Amino acid sequence: MPPHIHPLGDQGLLIDWGNRLDPAITQQLQACWQRLQALHLQGVLDLVPAYSSLAVLFDLDYLLKNYPQELPYTLVKNWVEPVLTANSTQTLASSSRNLDIPVCFEAPHALDLAELAAQKGLSPAAFIQQYCQTRYQVYMIGFLPGFAYLGTLDALLATPRKTTPRGSIPAGSVGIAGAQTGIYPLDSPGGWQIIGRCPWRLFTPANDPPVRLQMGDWVQFYPISSSEFAAQNEHTGT
């Protein structure tokens, strides 16, 4: 189904592929995002991708001043539409990375693992094996700087958020919410089911780019011991 374009306030438009989780939609969205970034359109302030939509935010005053004969929304829509018909899959394929990410599933990092495994009729070891055998795609970055939403979990492991969020979750915690999984980049309140902790820092403001995972990346987790976590821990001082 082709995407629908509609206004987003008076200084933006939304390219909408529909409210559903579909890897094919994600690929189209990412390709469109990359092509629009490459065009460096004057007057476009930001491009904000989500699961199945891409917001294009523009400078209303700049467009009115430089293109006085055209409505800003119509002008930007005319810039965007040709991109949606271009075949850009090759561009996307060349920029997506495959990453293997360590996770310690031992106490005290696996706050909810034992309970979740029992709910599924699995041992913790079997739960971890099932979790680690899937390769997950980064669908979007949001909530916190560098917080990657990854999917899709095996249906057996999918679990709703906690009914009562925790007031504080340490940076690096690996969580499950519905059919998604993700890693908290910073100490934060949160309601995801915590099954382990990654020793990597996912957000470092001084780096370029500051976030470690990028939309479109493919991730596979592998287990490490507590001693290996301590040896690789990058969260000191965060």
Image (spheres, rainbow, N blue to C red):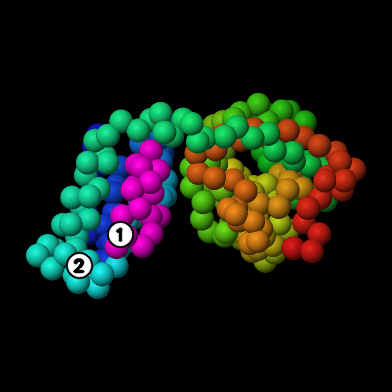
Q: Quadrant of the C terminus?
A: bottom right
- Establish if 123 lies above or below 187: above
Q: Residue 3 placed where, x, y %? A: 25, 41
Return the disc, 2 or 1, that comes first in the chain's sequence. 1
Disc 1 marks a residue whose amino acid type is: Gln
Is residue 26 visible in the rendered structure shown here? yes
Displayed quadrant of residue 121: top right
Which residue is at a point 35% across and 53% down the rendered structure image? 40
Residue positioned most to the front? 66
Q: Which residue is mark 1?
A: 42
Is residue 25 visible in the rendered structure shown here? no
Q: Which residue is mark 2?
A: 66
What residue span does the magenta drawing correspond to? 31-48
Q: Does residue 155 appear to the left or right of 234 in the view shown?
A: left
- Establish if 109 lies above or below 58: above
Secondary structure type for disc 2: helix
Contact check, label 2 and label 1, Cβ < 8 Å: yes
Total label count?
2
Which residue is at a point 26% across and 69% down the rendered structure image? 62
